[in-house]
Amino acid sequence: MLRGFYTAASGMFAQQRRTEMLTNNIANANTPGFKADQSSLKAFPEMLLQRMESNSAVPSKKFTTSTNIGSLTTGVYMQEATPQFSQGDIRETGRNADLALVNGNVPEGGSLFFTVENANGDVRYTRNGNFTLDGAGYLTTNEGYYVLNENGNRIQLENEQFSVASNGAILENGFEVNNIGITFSQNSNNLVKEGNGLFAATEDGEMVNANNNPDTTYAIRQGYIERSNVDVAASMTDMMTAYRAFEANQKILQAYDRSMEKAVNEIGRLR
């Protein structure tokens, strides 16, 4: 009976976490470059129940046979939330500092990113090309993170009257003065979400310059941004499914609670 409590409760926790993940996806549907998370549900190991039997009437006699009753599941949990790195729609903004990174030929499982420097001076990666120039002329994200070139240096410009070629070259007055650093990850699953559209590479996540990778092509479009890849309609449907599953587990938990109440208050009562 108590195992039923744990199984139903684990289902409720899993669906609650999934609902929170889907809510975050929908909340960021209009965030440039946002990558939607996907949930991965996994069952706990199953147990095989057996009934031990003995042909002897002597209590001390050891059990000699057993009969399989069947398997018993021990619940489910949400193992992880994995970002989906598919290309988002490209939307025109007309802003000179807005840059959209458009995938060309990208090996399966890999992804391309802008390279930025966070507030702690660490290198991070993003698909959000909603950039601006700060007071000192440095190209930054809206959160103030410095955009880096292919050598890992900050990009400083004279003013916003610059142009960016499709290969990432930055031109001022017709002369190439810098470039946008584009980094390639062979396995996007080795990246960890940090918030504000940033990703950090793990120890196993080797990041390389996309310009030095002959198997990778891309194009940068100035005056455009990449929208999030959140499918709002599908996310709403998944959220309703998760809510119904949560509600079903809740009903099961209430049924177990009523059964336990009867067991405690009525079984064995003297009349």
Image (cartoon, rainbow, N blue to C red):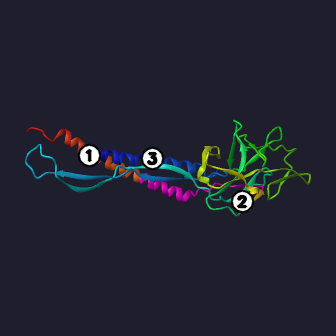
Q: Position of residue 84 (x, y in %)?
A: 59, 55
Mark 2–mark 3 distance (CA, rounded to whole Å): 35 Å
- Taking depth in this image into account, of 259 and 71 the one nearest to the observer is 71
- Residue drawn at x 35%, y 48% is 8
Crowding at mark 2 (Cα within 10 Å: few <14, some 14-19, many 20+): many
**Residue type, label 2:** Val
The C terminus lies in quadrant = top left
Q: Secondary structure at mark 1?
A: loop
The residue beneath circle 1 is 1
Of callouts 1 and 3, which one flags the residue occurring earlier in the amino acid sequence?
1
Mark 1–mark 3 distance (CA, rounded to whole Å): 23 Å
**Residue type, label 1:** Met
Instruction: Tell me where the magenta segment starts and ends, as one range.
Output: 222-244
Q: Position of residue 102 (x, y in %)?
A: 71, 59
The residue beneath circle 2 is 102
The residue beneath circle 3 is 16
